[in-house]
Image (spheres, rainbow, N blue to C red):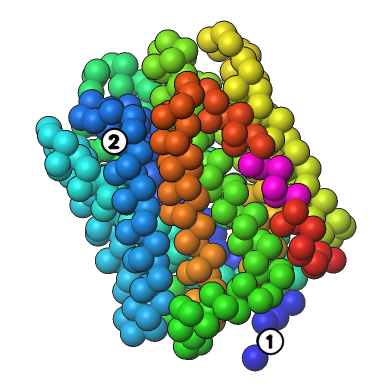
Amino acid sequence: MPKPKKLSVKNNRNLFILYSLGLILAFSGALPAYIQSNFLGQFVGVQAMSAYLILANLLSVLAILFFPGLIRKLSNYFLTKISLILYASSLLGLAISTNAALALVSIILFTISSNLIWINMDFLIEDFSIDAVTGKIRSIYFTFINIGWILSPTLAAYLLIGKGEYTLIFLIAASLTIPFFLTFLYEGRKLQDHNKYKRLSFGLAFKRMWTKPNLRGIFFVALLLQIFFNSAVIYVPLYLFQNMGMSWEVLGPIFSIMLIPFVLVEIPAGIIADRYLGEKELLITGFLILSVSLFLFYYIPVPSAWLWAAVLFLSRIGAALIEAMRETYFFKIVSVKDADDINIFRTTTPLGHTLGSLLAIGTLFFFPLQYLFLFLSIIMLSGFFFIASIKDTK
């Protein structure tokens, strides 16, 4: 049965519930995001930390590939609850970590469960979406998510400065899963699975993705964005804190300011893509801005708070445009029943973080850390090639 062209009042209500859950989950996940590299740095060096993050992300890829079969057998609704319990457990593990072994096991579980819970959310959002306003729906959803990300860095920095340790940050992040879980249970009947998911093996799904230029192109666009996010979350805080000597009292507000474009840009971009331009022009603009910003990361030699805030803000304008168009385009060419396509697409998150960490390890063998941003600037230019391979939906 084709999807309706307009959202019903019931669908709008369900979407608002999911937007709110996305906000809570994002706030929880973002609290430890920018401090995790410095937290792990208490136990291991930068290269060893990168190696453990690579392991965590490769295990996430494997978990994601098995996820479609589990969703078909157990339902997305049930697995959302399981993913959330694992996610909360990983945060509690990080909170009580006093040695490298527990910290590294917990960060692996955190990475895997974080990837899976967002896939669960993808299915829930897509279940109540319609193609004609996919850009608007996805942009609003990501705006709610990004509000959570904006709030978190300043709070995390405040807690770190006031307490001088990380335990409270992880405990607060874990406690935020409680309102998510209670809301999810209360609204459970409305959020139960309404679709029979298509059966398609990973090999066939990957072949399908590879032979369809639109799916292949947007896959690599998403992969490049995740490579950038890896450096943004792991190596930029590390560089500014350790190499530039900037304190968390300064970095917290800077990181909150830099995320504002995700709230300001994504909804207008989604509406423009739905009604006027299509996605390609906005993707090109986003990659151009991102590449220039990364070069400035490499080039700026001074720890000026205002200068870094401006450049980081600029980079997120580019990333916000790419993120909005990545979601809009992909979910216009697939449906919620295409479980394998969605899961392969979401492997771009752990794959991108794996490639980003591998690039960081390789860079650190031969160059100072700032050269990572120069290499990333060049790599982002390949986005133009992948954008050229896709066909606009307008």
Q: Is residue 383 magenta?
A: yes
Magenta stretch, residue numbers: 379-384
Q: Nearer the viewer, residue 241 or 217?
A: 217
Label 2–label 1 contact, CB within 8 A: no
Q: x and y percent of residue 327 in the render?
A: 63, 59
Q: Which residue is mark 1?
A: 2
Magenta region includes residue 253: no
Which mark identifies residue 198? none
**Which residue sits furthest bottom?**
1
Quarter of the image with the C terminus in it = bottom right
Residue that carries the numbered disc 2 in the rendered image: 48
Which one is earlier in the sequence, the residue at label 2 or at label 1?
Answer: 1
Magenta stretch prevailing secondary structure: helix
**SS of the residue under disc 1:** loop
For residue 365, which quarter of the picture? top left
Look at the picture and state if 17 lies above or below 153: below
Residue 117 left/right relative to 226:
left
The alpha-carbon separation of the residues under discs 2 and 1 comes to 50 Å
> In front: mark 2 or mark 1?
2
The quarter of the rendered structure image containing the N terminus is: bottom right
**Residue at figure coordinates x 58%, y 11% from the top left:** 301
Amino acid carrying label 1: it is Pro
User: Would residue 357 be visible to someone looking at this image?
Assistant: yes
Q: Residue at x 38, y 44 (%)?
A: 29
Question: Residue at the spot x=30%, y=66% of the render?
Answer: 81
